Amino acid sequence: MKITKKLALTILSASVLGSAFVSTSAFAKTDLSLWYHGAGNKVEAKVINQIVNDFNNSQDDWNVVLESFPQGSYNDSVVAAALANNLPDILDVDGPVMPNWAWAGYLRPLLIDEAKIADFLPGVKGYWDGKLYSIGLWDSAVAMMTRRSTLNEVGARIPTIDSPWTEEEFNDVLKKLKATGKYDYPLDLGMAESGEWFPYAFSPFLQSFGGDLIDRSTYKTAEGTLNGPEAIAFGEWWQSLFVNGYAPGNSQDPADHETGLLEGKYAMQWYGNWAALKNLNKFGDDALFLPAPDFGHGPKIGAASWQFGVSSASKHPQGASDFIEFALQDKYLAAFSDSIGVIPPTQSAAALTKNYRQGGALAVFYALSKAQALVRPVTPGYIVEAKVFEKALADIADGADVADTLDSAADEINADIEKNRGYSH
Amino acid sequence: MFQLDKDNPTLRLIVRYMVLTLIALIFVTPILFMMMSSLKPDQQLLADTSSIRAFLPIGDISFDNYKAAFERAPIGMFMLNSLLVTGVTVVLGLLVCSMAGFSFVFLNWRGKSIAFSIILATLIVPFETIAIPMLLMVSKLPWLGLDGFSWGWLNSYRVQIIPFIADGLTIFLFAQYFKDLPKELIEASRIEGCSWWQVYWRVVMPLSGPIIATAAILKFLAMYNQYLWPIMVTQQEQYRPVLVGLQYFFQLNTAWGEVMAYLTIITVPVLAFYLALQRAFIASIASTGVKG
């Protein structure tokens, strides 16, 4: 009897413990850390939190824990964390920086079904070395912002995506706008901005002239592409904008850059879709968002914004990839677009948005991304090329000799590539 | 007709005050611009920058930017973090550095000159050059806390405090000041039977008010303005200081009014700290020639 009672107690204890274990393991989720660059942006935070919550509630394996960073210090934080071996499972990365982080070993290829991103805009797919390392939930685009009435006043043709301005037409428009005497400058290029804006916004002009930051066939030299005849033609045109008083130079007042077009100080502004809504609010139907001019080798604009990737330190790359794949649903792409004004990467997501659906106020930006976008050079050395290009353009705007400046820039880029043994190209 | 008279005391006073007023204006106008801008909506703020209106509380004035700034970022937490890290580092730093300075000036020990030279040499080493080795070091250091033993100091207050307690400049300032104290005082204290600790704590430190104030202000500013190190070692928001918090306000379309409101808020502790210690700070400059 005693033994039987003892046995019963043992069985009971084992059953209780067993069931507790089973129920715990059923609900125990593995944490996945996610780093995101959007701290300080309340509307963006709302969308990313929604995605995280929905994902966590949608399955029983993973629990994503979000840590947001301010954008200005995000890259430094990630690089420091990589050095200290403290990277999260999932992180977002600026598109043109991705090859550098992949090459440096911070990222690993995504484990997602690439068929699901077949219809995404090309600029949001982060390929390096033939593998998909990152994918973006949106893209951005630059356009020539102005007013219909401004162009009508000088008899300028309204360009379209199929028929953009030629170099001659564009220069003629600038000349006529300058001659009206109504504007401080005909064109605001955004020289008050610094950093990534220069290569993002201005290298497409160089590429439309036929040059580039680097020879994309090998990614091993800038000789001939950054300082060849096409690049020099671009540099001379670039310098003429400032010499002729068509655009404010490096000393542009940031306040003028913010409000100059709205206040009538500038006739046109070369700027991104994130600033488009304030133009629409101010000018209504008179607002225009025009394609980039064609300088001979087709009109070009920049592409690739922030994208999600999986860190090489992650012990759960499948879970991390599952989260990214989950985030690619049209409803989330549309939610980001509606909340922060970015361009959704698919036609089906665009159809769900307020501004990018067919006939929407900003639909032209989706069309621009699709028709004109060219990603910045896909190479780990891009982060150096971007800085060198920025300095060269600023110097040329200040009056430096075009050929000498571009020669020096090409040499500097080549020296960096050599120092890094070709960046694995 | 008015004639310039060098010996006219009234005229000299007027000229002196005019020059001082001009210098004061140069220093005050940026602060005034920041405060006034924090009360204006963005469009007005940007339009006013090209005129005297930028320094005047006119137009559409409100505290809306402050409300929005508090909604955008956990300002209270950032302030608390900065004040905690700065306060603890300043207090511990003054104690450690003054003891080091005392040791270099009053105690005799082998290698003192070389050690002092090495400490002086650290003054010419920019922090940026040692940031990465320091990061690698602190990411592997052990720690015994209330929650037990752990490895790595990242994401903590201690990683923002401990590496900055001792610094070459503060040790140098104390050592220089201590050198000018009357040697007889120290000798008399020793003859009266004071231990070295008593000489330091009861004789030297009470006479060191001006240099304590100067060192405190300089260290306070250096710590309160920390940016690079915190972004390297604090990935969690709960440990971020005010200058990292400033980055929360720079989005694609920057809300300049909120930036100015945030800057106004985080400038208050600096001004208050300086005002509290300014008499001793000025006395220190007057007596030692030390400048901040």
Image (tube, coloured by chain):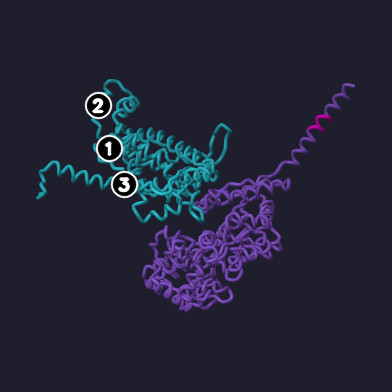
Chain colours: A purple, B cyan
Q: Which residue shows up at 14% across the image and 41% down it?
A: B10
Q: Measured along the vertical axis of the image, is residue B163 above or below residue A8?
A: below
The x, y position of residue A86, in whole percent, is 57, 48
Q: For mark 2, what is the residue?
A: B185
Q: Main secondary structure of the magenta part?
A: helix
Dot 1 amino acid type: Ile
The x, y position of residue B126, in whole percent, is 39, 49
Dot 3 amino acid type: Phe
Q: CA distance from mark 3 to mark 2?
A: 41 Å
Lower position in the chain sequence, tag 1 or tag 2:
2
Magenta-colored stretch includes residue A14: yes
Q: Chain of mark 2?
A: B
Q: For mark 3, what is the residue?
A: B27
Dot 2 amino acid type: Leu
Q: CA distance from mark 1 to mark 2?
A: 25 Å
Instruction: Point out the frontmost of discs 1 and 2.
Output: 1
- Residue B282 numbered mark, or none: 1
Instruction: Point out the frontmost of discs 3 and 2.
Output: 3
User: Local crowd at mark 3 within 10 Å, few (<14), some, or many (≥20)?
Assistant: few
Q: Is residue A292 left or right of residue A354?
A: left
Magenta-colored stretch includes residue A349: no
Q: Secondary structure at mark 2?
A: helix
The x, y position of residue A198, in whole percent, is 47, 64
Nearer the observer, A264 or B34: A264
Magenta residues, start to end:
A11-16
Q: Chain of mark 3?
A: B
Q: Measured along the vertical axis of the image, is residue B169 above or below residue A10?
A: below
Q: Is residue A417 visible?
A: no
Q: Is residue A358 visible?
A: yes
Q: Which residue shows up at 48% across the image and 78% down it?
A: A169
Q: Measured along the vertical axis of the image, is residue A35 above or below residue A424?
A: above
